[in-house]
Amino acid sequence: MAVLPAHDMGPAANAFREEVRAWLAKHWTPEQHAEHLKKPFRHRGWDTEFSRLMGREGWIGIGWPKEFGGQGRSPAEQIAFVTEVANSGAPAHAHNCGETIVAQALFAYGTKEQQDEWLPAIRRGERTFGLGYSEPEAGSDLAALRTGATRAGDDWIVNGQKLWSTGGDKSEYMWLAVRTDPEAKKHAGISVLMVDLKSPGVTIRPSLALYGKTFSATFYDNVRVSAKNMVGKVNDGWRVITDALAAERVMIGATRMAHLESVFDRLTECVKKTPLRDDPVVRDRIGALAADLEVARQLQLRNSRLVEQGKVPIHEAAAGKVFTSELQERIGQAALDVLGTGGLLSEDAPSAPLGEMEQVLRHSIMGMIGGGTNEIQRNVIALRGLDLPR
Amino acid sequence: MSPPRPSADSLSDFDRNLLRQSVRDLLADRWPAERAVELETDPAAVAAVWQAMAAHGLASLASKADETGLREVVLAFEELGRASCPAPLLGAVAANIAFGTGQTNATRALLDDLHQGKAAIALALGAFDGDRGAGRVEVRDGRLSGKVSFVEGAQSVTHVLVLTDRPTGAAIVANGAAGLTVQETPGLMIPAFAELIFEDTPATVVNTPSQLLADIAMVARLACLARAVGAAQRAFELAVDHAKVRKQFGQLIGQFQAVQHKLANIVIALDGARLTLEAAAEARDSGDPAWHVFASAALAFAGPSLREVSIQTHRALGAIGYAEEHEAPRHFRRVHTDVARFGGAPRARQELADYLLGPRQ
């Protein structure tokens, strides 16, 4: 390993890290990993079988409060967990959205009935979600969304269109932001529904994104959704969405961070084995990226400390997101400079010095756009962090 | 080398906040922003603020008896940077570490004077500086010869602490000793650095392992980085305040997204610099043998980042911040000075490469 030394995160997190490592060593063997890599790139990472195994063995919802069946693990322990899972390459994406975003919202806004029904299913890895936020006319300006829901007896009737839902073609449910009061001011008339994607009237159209996996447009044509599937009060959805987003940003950031550390480790290991290791320009570049990685780690740690203190990081989370996603861009660019044309080759290409490096660069675009573009994050820092005038 | 083991009595975050506030209050009183330009060129004023700091107990920072570590040093230097105060704290911290163990009568007497504000010390790192032009000093029969450059604060101190590499030692020289020539070398920083020429100069020399001297040099690098962070932060706060009151084209300039994003980028850079610096200091204080890797990371990031912060701060302030009587130019000088010293960010990047890839063949 050619990585920065680990921060001492305390005895509890260190011990827990060992426990996670031991479990992964047993349940995600090099043979399984090699088998997984034979799948086309776009199918990797999403494995409902593995999610169910993790669920059965208690590895989903480790950070959830105990009252909801979680282990109540600290942010430091959760960071250790996602880092180990990312380093192992185990396919743990399928349950992510449910575990982090949907569950967080259900803790705060779900009815007792919803919590009893949905949380155990998510925790067992048996219920997967996509995020239905963006629309053709509502991207950065999310509150301009127009997909509507009107009440009909015990149901809501949904009509509209969503875009760019990661995993939308693989998930069972959509976590859908809808307009329930067209007269209300933008943020005021929004609600959240959990929509079964097998419902009549749903059309899913996946397309391949630049980074090599799919995202989907979904169309809703008079789709009937039980009122029991609304999370939070009618027209109070903006709060549900933003609270859940803030809470999950920390863990998403930690996952991205772990991914970057393992990419950087592979790059430096590769450099170490070639004459490049003595090239002063390469060494200077590697040194600069190592420092940036330490900055990204510290920004993430600050966010988790704030969560631990019961605070919601807003502009702090934005700063972490901006820095980490732009660091991914820099690492991808550096890999191409250092490896030259060979860095453009896929991992399975003959004579590739190191695969997947150009993919890191393609993927970095998603990091800068998804979850609110970095320009929007900078607005958040300016307006919420510095209190600059609107 | 491994840093000292943590003490059970080390300060809490709450204590550190109190300490920070007390240093800020002291400097606001003794080194007010509106007089800083006039005071900084007056060695007597620098000596006076040092006495006030010593009376406050700050001269014993990083000393064994004090139970303070690098985190407290860092916060004190941040405050010096904010206030644009060139008080000679660097030499005091270095002396406290160098002479903390195995004291002789001479070093004990010096530390006593230092802690009472009767002595003030400038630090000459020489061969341990990291800059190719820093020079070096040799010891022969208890006397020094050689030349060191880039020494700060020599105008207002009673002693110079000189690190020597042949043999490795920490030498104390009285300012004004026979065979010592102090020559100011004007440049970006005010007060100017000085060049010190030693010609068979009498000194009290304490043989010191080179690892301890390297440790002192790394502490000095982080202390100066902390001062740059404090200066950059203060200038940035002025720019934010400015953006909230300055109107152009009929609106506050802080409403323009071009200005908002500029200031948001500064927040990220300052957060990154401060958090990595604090993490490195905490790692040293807690006895983490990898602390120097975290220190290199902080230095490597902050060098180019704080420069950019300083430049962008000035762009947000416009011509209003360009006059030397405004606070901002002082902070520009401080930031650019402190991040360029001791080999700067390029050296720190090489240290990280050495750690990750092994030394260059």
Image (cartoon, coloured by chain):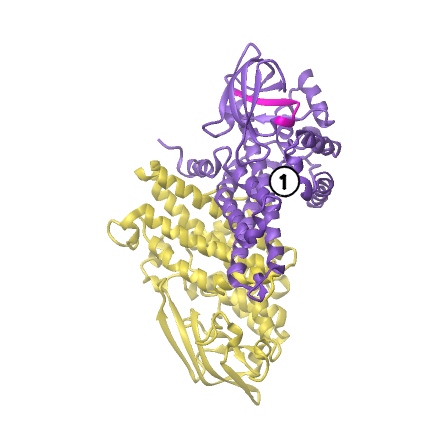
Chain colours: A yellow, B purple
Does the magenta-highlighted stretch encompass residue B157?
yes
Q: Which residue is found at the position 54% from the left and 57% from the top?
A: B264
Residue A174: percent from left, percent from top: 48, 74
Residue placed farthest to the right in the image? Answer: B55
* Quadrant housing the N terminus of chain B: top right
Name above or below for residue B225 compared with residue A389: above
Residue A377: percent from left, percent from top: 52, 62
| Stretch of the chain drawn in magenta | B155-164
Residue A157 versus residue A135: which sits nearer the camera? A135
Residue A60: tell me if it is visible.
no
Residue A188 versus residue A87: which sits nearer the camera? A188
Residue type at tag 1: Ser
Q: Is residue A263 left or right of residue B17?
A: left
Q: Which residue is found at the position 52% from the left and 52% from the top?
A: B315
Q: Which residue is mark 1?
A: B84
Predominant SS of the magenta segment: strand
User: Mark 1 falls within which chain?
Assistant: B
Does the magenta-highlighted stretch encompass residue A346?
no
Residue placed farthest to the left in the image? Answer: A350
Residue placed farthest to the bottom in the image? Answer: A153
Q: SS for tag 1? A: loop
Q: Is residue A86 left or right of residue A111?
A: left
Name above or below for residue B49 compared with residue B110: below
Q: Which residue is found at the position 54% from the left and 50% from the top?
A: B314
* Quadrant housing the C terminus of chain B: top left
Residue A314: percent from left, percent from top: 59, 61
Residue B345: tell me if it is visible.
yes
Q: Using a 10 Å C-alpha cutoff, classify the residue at mark 1 as few (fewer than 14 neighbours), some (14 to 19) or many (20 or more).
A: many
Residue B31: percent from left, percent from top: 70, 39
Q: Which residue is found at the position 57% from the left and 44% from the top?
A: B329
